[in-house]
Every structure is written in C-alpha cells, then in structure tokens.
Image: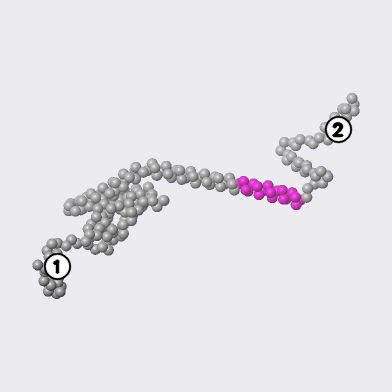
Amino acid sequence: MLCEQKETFMAIDEAPAAPAEGETPSPPVEPTRPGGSRPEPAERLSAIEGAIAEFNRRSAHREAVIDRLHEENQRLRGGLYRALLEPVIADLIRMYDALLREADRLTAENTDPAYGRLLESFADDALLTLDRCGLEEFTARHGEPFDPGRHTAVSVVPVDDEALDNTVAEVIAVGFLDRESGRVRRPVRARFHQFRPAAVSAEDHEAARSTAPVDADAAATPEAP
C-alpha cells in the first residue's frame, strides 16, 4: 500500500506543471527520429519552405477565384443596369430628335428666334443626359460612303454623277453608340445619293439621227424593186 502511494506521488511530481495564468507555455518537445536523434536544420527548413509554398499556392488560387467572381458580378450588374435604362434611353433619343426638328421648323417659319434657341437648349440637356447614360453622339459627312453598320437610309436623292452614288447627301438625325462596348445604339439617319443616268428626250434622239453622217456606199446602192 505504501509503495503504491509512493509511486503515485512520484508520478505527480514528474508530470509537467500547468502554466500559470499570464505565462507563456513552454514549447513542445521536438519529435525525435526512431534512433533517438533530432532532425537536421536543413530538413526542418525544407519542410517549412514546402509549407510556405503550399500556403502561397492556395492563397493565389483563392485570389484568382475572388477576382473572377467579382468580374462576373460587375458584368451582370452592368447588363442589368443597361436593361433597366433601355426604355429611358429610347425615349430620350426620340425627345432629342423631336426638339431639334421643332427648333428647325420655328427657324424656317421666321418666328421669334428665342423660341428656337429655347428648344435647342432643351435638346442639349437631353444630349447631356444621354451622355451620362453612357452614349456618345456621332454623325456623317457629306459624300461619305454608305456603311450599313452606322447608317440608315431615309430616302434617296437622284444624281447624274456616278461618283456620288451611294454616298451621304444630307443627315436627318445623328447616331448614338455605347461608349463602353462601342456598339451602335442608333445609326445615323440620312438621305443618300443614287445614280440615275439622264433620260434622252425624243427631240434629242431625232436631232442626233438627223446630224449623223450618211454612209456614201449605202446611199449610192439603189433599193431592190
């Protein structure tokens, strides 16, 4: 009985004491090799480098996933934003065209110029709002060749100069394109030249026949009875 109590007290004395509150616990005992020797410092450094490399690889993969998800989120938000503004943009473009047409009509009727300037200022405000929505205004030059991706033909203007065929004669309404994607939101509306040869009148045709030279051999040959 006394021997058992003595062994118990010895075991308690040999057990490591728990660290007191506020004290730093002692580092754990390093594992030893089967032969009883500790690992070499080079092996320990190699293990640490491998752990750090694996941590960096996982961190880079996590950052790449986060960046891809953020990009997809931004793309979805941009598409939703454009879808919500689509009817507003269409109405703003129609209002801009209508204000400019009315201003031109008042100017042509020789009314008070203040009314035309007032409507033009309203049109400028609509254009600024379209710019805030991400649209840019563009137009076409006189004589510019027809581009189906940027132009819409409203009507044609006949010309007798073949070099002007299928070129811009007059711009009716400017176009708009998306600043971010470069997509044409509304093409330029314009009149285009169309080549049409000048028609020869009957009088001109008879005059051409009367002044044409006569073949002497044909005139000397008598007609068969």
Residue 75 x/y as whole percent: 46, 45
**On screen, residue 221 above or below 76:** below
Three-letter amino acid code of the residue under disc 1? Ala
What is the magenta range?
41-59
Residues marked 2 and 1 touching at CB (< 8 Å): no
Left or right of residue 193, residue 213 in this image = left
**Number of the label disc, if any, that sits on residue 10:** 2
Q: Quick check: can you spot residue 175?
A: no
- Residue 122's x, y, as percent? 28, 48
Q: What is the magenta segment's predominant secondary structure?
A: helix
Q: Which amino acid does label 2 sit on?
A: Met
Quarter holding residue 168: bottom left
Q: Is 52 included in the stretch rendered in magenta?
A: yes
Q: Say left or right for 211 vs 153.
A: left
Of 140 and 156, the residue lying toward us: 156
- Residue 159 is situated, as x and y percent measured from the top left of the image, at 22, 60
Above or below for 116 versus 5: below
Place residue 86 in its image quadrant.
top left
Q: Is mark 2 on a helix, strand or loop?
A: helix
Residue 72 coordinates in the image, percent (x, y): 49, 45
Q: How crowded is mark 2: few (under 14 residues within 10 Å), some or many (20 or more)?
A: few
Q: Give the camera-side residue of 192 and 205.
A: 205
Mark 2 vs mark 1: in front: 1
According to the picture, the residue beneath numbered tag 1 turns out to be 208
Quadrant where the N terminus sits is top right
The colour scheme used here is one colour
Tell me what residue is drawn at x 17 percent, y 53 percent.
110
Q: Which residue lies furthest to the top in this view?
A: 1
Mark closer to the chain start, 2 or 1: 2
**Residue at the spot 66% in from the left edge and 49% down from the top edge:** 53
User: Is residue 19 visible to the viewer in this orientation of the structure?
Assistant: yes
